[in-house]
Amino acid sequence: MKGFTLGLCTLELHIPQSHSLKEKRQVLRGIKSKIKNRFNVVIAEVGALDRWQYAVLGVTTLSNDQTMVNSVLDQVFTQIAACPEAEIVKHRLEFF
């Protein structure tokens, strides 16, 4: 049986223009929609649910090729970093 690699990217975001949880959710909804439409990944808000200028997103993908997993998560990071509404404060890549 051939192995597989699960990649997890955790991104901590600052959303400076958000003044309410509703505005934060609107920004995150746009980011998540864009990522889901372009990449074969699962993306969800996984932390800081009650803070209106801060969010933690988890992005994961699975493949039998670790290089492919790394490439996809790097592309997702680049796409989110280009988003003008949110700034990446911290990120972490993990492989299992």
Image: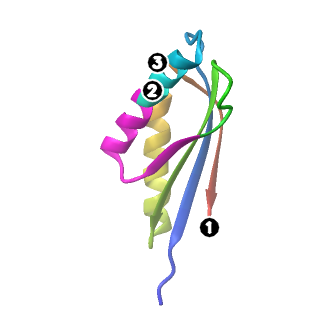
Crowding at dot 3, Cα within 10 Å, few <14 / some 14-19 / many 20+, comes out as few
Crowding at dot 1, Cα within 10 Å, few <14 / some 14-19 / many 20+, comes out as few
Q: Does residue 52 sit above or below 33 in this rendering?
A: above
Q: Amino acid at mark 1?
A: Phe
Quadrant where the C terminus sits is bottom right
Marks 2 and 3 in Cβ contact (< 8 Å): yes
Q: Nearer the viewer, residue 46 or 7?
A: 46
Crowding at dot 2, Cα within 10 Å, few <14 / some 14-19 / many 20+, comes out as few
- Image mark count: 3
> Is 37 a magenta residue?
yes
> Residue under circle 2?
82
Give the residues in magenta.
Answer: 30-45
From the top left corner, tell me how far across and down residue 67 is, in percent. 47, 63
> In the visual, does 54 lie left or right of 43?
right
> Residue under circle 3?
84
From the top left corner, tell me how far across and down residue 57 is, in percent. 57, 39
Q: Does residue 60 sit above or below 33 in this rendering?
A: below
> In the visual, does 43 lie left or right of 51?
left
> Is 50 a magenta residue?
no
Q: State the CA–CA distance, disc 1 to disc 2.
A: 27 Å
